[in-house]
Image (cartoon, rainbow, N blue to C red):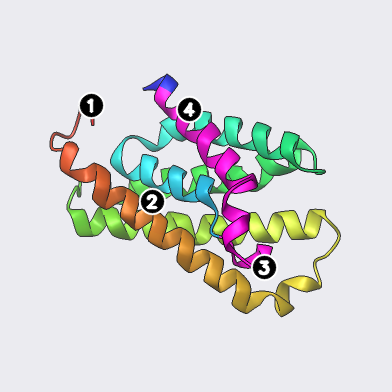
Amino acid sequence: MIVLSLVAGAAAALIQTTVLPQFFLDAWTTPFLPAALVATWATTRQPIETWRITLISALILGVMSSERVGWFLLALLPISLIAVFLHEISAQNRHLTTQIGRASATALTGTICYFIILTIVAGKGSLLLAAGPDIAIACLGTMALAIIGVLAVSPFRKKPIGLF
């Protein structure tokens, strides 16, 4: 599973920086794939496993952009923290509706944290209010991707402990 998480994190970051922006007119409205992947992985597996995805995604996003890798890592870490927190709250509840709720909440709050941190670090904090509706669209897209991920993976995850 280590290799799979690294490959998935690298693929999400590469798609985020290369293919996905071609489908959206504004960068603010683009769903954030690494957040959706972390939310799906933390919901269907264990949230402690998401640090690999966070590290590889931050590395690739930093290399592919003009920002430093550390800023991306700082922006991605709250997603894993939120995933761990939500898992601890409802660890015993493995119903599909709870999993969808956890993935949605992780994707939503993680994407908001990501946008806030990177916008402030870039010195453009005043743009946050003006870009609010666009960020909301990105958050909804990220939530939808996380829900689709949970729905796609959860049928293969019948037992509390085991492989997909």
How many neighbours does mark 3 have within 10 angstroms: few (below 14), some (14-19), or many (20 or more)? few
In the rendered structure, which disc, 3 or 2, sits on the residue that comes first in sequence?
A: 3
Residue 121 in the image: state x and y as whole percent.
80, 53
Q: Is residue 130 above or below residue 74?
A: below
What residue did someone put label 3 on? 26
The mark lying in front, picked from 1 and 3, is 3
Residue 93 highlighted magenta (yes or no): no
Q: What residue range appears in magenta?
A: 4-30
The amino acid type found where label 3 is placed reads: Asp
Check disc 2 and report its element: helix, strand or loop: helix
Check disc 4 and report its element: helix, strand or loop: helix
How many numbered marks appear?
4
Residue at 13 percent of width and 34 percent of height:
159
Real-space CA distance between mark 3 and mark 2, rounded to the nearest whole angstrom: 31 Å
Check disc 3 and report its element: helix, strand or loop: loop
Q: For the view shown, which residue lies furthest in the left direction?
A: 158
Label number found at residue 86:
2
Label number found at residue 7:
4
Residue 11 in the image: state x and y as whole percent.
52, 35
The amino acid type found where label 4 is placed reads: Val
